[in-house]
Image: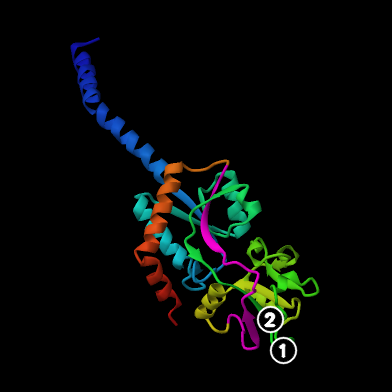
Amino acid sequence: MSARTMCRIKNTQRIFSATRPLLILVLILLSQNVQAELKLCLAEADFPPFTFKVDVASSEYKGYTVELIEYVSTHLERPIVIRKFPWKRCLFLLERGEVDIVADAYHDVQRAKKFYYSRPYYKMTPQFYYDQRVFPDGFPHASGPVSLPEYRGCGIQGYSYEHYGPGYNRLIKSASSLVQLFWQLARKRCDYVVEELEIVEGVNLLGPSIIDLSNIKHARPESARSPELHFIYSKDRAIDAKIIADINVAIQSFINSGQASKVMEKLMRP
């Protein structure tokens, strides 16, 4: 081996020795960056005022939950990547560990067997809706219509209605969206439908012609409790407990700072 070749080898070794700590640091940072990203699934169907498309042609979503996610991401100093799928698909991906978080989940006993829940970030107002032309004297709801087996109540596929009280499991859940749910009511496929007040009012803000409520009355079922919205995490593939705790801190800060109220007031303003 020539002296010139030996010299080149030694120079290469010196350069590698000098840059090795930097290369290791870069690899560590890249590894941390990969670990830092959280994947969150949102139901792709409009769920105003919490998540909804800016316009029909857009893939951009806005709403209370979207702003909360941005707030949490800033608080954690971690990017949160949002993926959008049908609600049941989101739950499937969460169970498989393909996403870390699913947003806008109600609490129910069966779901709690599989998932951890964040602290609640919004309390909803349960309602049932009926056609006043069919029930001109009002709807009998002493303890909530879901407790009356002689009436057909309807809900949306994959949604939890446990908070509506005894008889909730008799609800016909064949609608794929809120629009289809009220279409079923208009076509007398159902005697009543159940949905939270904030959601129906939110849809009306998107456009008064989306759901025709001109002959529709609504009331709060006496037996219903107010459902709350949560983030959920898989028990089998849960993210780090500290991250879950930090998300809870961020949610509480979002509420206590008044930011939550400001966001909702802005969204619900006609």
Q: Quadrant of residue 227?
A: bottom right
Foreground: 222 or 195? 222
The circle drawn on residue 137 is: 1
Task: Write down the residue under mark 2.
Answer: 130
Q: Point out the frontmost of discs 1 and 2.
A: 1
Q: Which residue appears farthest toward the top when viewing the image?
A: 1
Residue 42 position within the rendered picture, expressed as x and y whole percent measured from the top left? 52, 59
In-image side of 270 versus 232 (left or right) = left
Q: Quadrant of residue 5?
A: top left
The circle drawn on residue 57 is: none
- Marks 1/2: CA–CA distance: 11 Å
Residue 121 position within the rendered picture, expressed as x and y whole percent measured from the top left? 47, 61
User: Mark 2: which secondary structure?
Assistant: strand
Residue 42 is one of the magenta-drawn residues: no
Q: Is residue 44 above or below residue 48?
A: above
Residue 166 position within the rendered picture, expressed as x and y whole percent measured from the top left? 71, 64
The residue that appears at 37% across and 39% down in the rendered structure is 32
Q: Give the residue type that dot 1 points to.
A: Asp
Image quadrant occupied by the C terminus: bottom left
Residue 182 position within the rendered picture, expressed as x and y whole percent measured from the top left? 66, 77
Q: Which residues are magenta?
A: 210-235
